[in-house]
Image: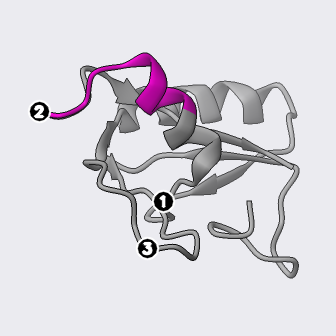
């Protein structure tokens, strides 16, 4: 989304490889959500396999995640003491 990418750089598919992901301030102040752990080893493995299969993919790190991730996660999972999982975000244009 436009919080992580902008119209001059808006890939069709992007995969996050960070060790930790923060959530974006989408204009109304940052939501009170803890950062979520990433899984860089798994993300790199996924990226390598997709590129080896000639899949056109963008890799990103240190970009905030927006409501596409935080809204469903905050409804599905307890998170007051931190998220109970690691995440490999895949952004789809």
Q: CA distance from mark 1 to mark 3?
A: 22 Å
Check the image and tell me how it is coloured.
Answer: one colour
Specify whether 91 is left or right of 56.
Answer: left
Q: Is residue 22 above or below residue 89?
A: below
Nearer the observer: mark 2 or 1; the answer is 2
Q: Tell whether position 77 is magenta.
A: yes
Q: CA distance from mark 3 to mark 2?
A: 21 Å
Do labels 1 and 3 touch, CB within 8 Å?
Answer: no
Residue 81: give its label.
2
Q: Residue at x 83, y 58 (%)?
A: 11
Quadrant of residue 84 within the rendered picture: top left
Q: Earlier in the sequence, mark 1 or mark 3?
A: 3
Nearer the observer: mark 3 or 2; the answer is 3
Q: CA distance from mark 2 to mark 1?
A: 24 Å
Q: Is residue 77 above or below residue 67?
A: above
Viewer-nearest residue: 52 or 89: 89
Residue 24 at x, y percent in the picture? 49, 64
Residue 61: give its label.
1
Q: Earlier in the sequence, mark 2 or mark 1?
A: 1
Q: Tell whether position 91 is magenta.
A: no
Residue 30 at x, y percent in the picture? 40, 67
Q: Earlier in the sequence, mark 3 or mark 2?
A: 3
Q: Residue at x 11, y 33 (%)?
A: 81
To which residue does mark 3 refer? 29
Q: Residues within 10 Å of mark 1 (few under 14, many from 20)?
A: some
Do labels 3 and 2 touch, CB within 8 Å?
Answer: no
């Amino acid at each position: 989304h436009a919080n992580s990418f902008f119209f001059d750089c808006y890939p069709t598919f992007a995969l996050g490889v960070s060790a930790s992901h923060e959530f974006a301030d989408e204009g109304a102040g940052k939501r009170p959500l803890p950062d979520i752990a990433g899984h860089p080893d798994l993300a790199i493995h996924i990226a390598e396999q997709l590129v080896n299969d000639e899949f056109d993919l963008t890799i990103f790190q240190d970009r905030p995640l927006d409501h596409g991730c935080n809204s469903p996660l905050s409804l599905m999972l307890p998170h007051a003491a931190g998220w109970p999982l690691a995440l490999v975000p895949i952004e789809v244009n």
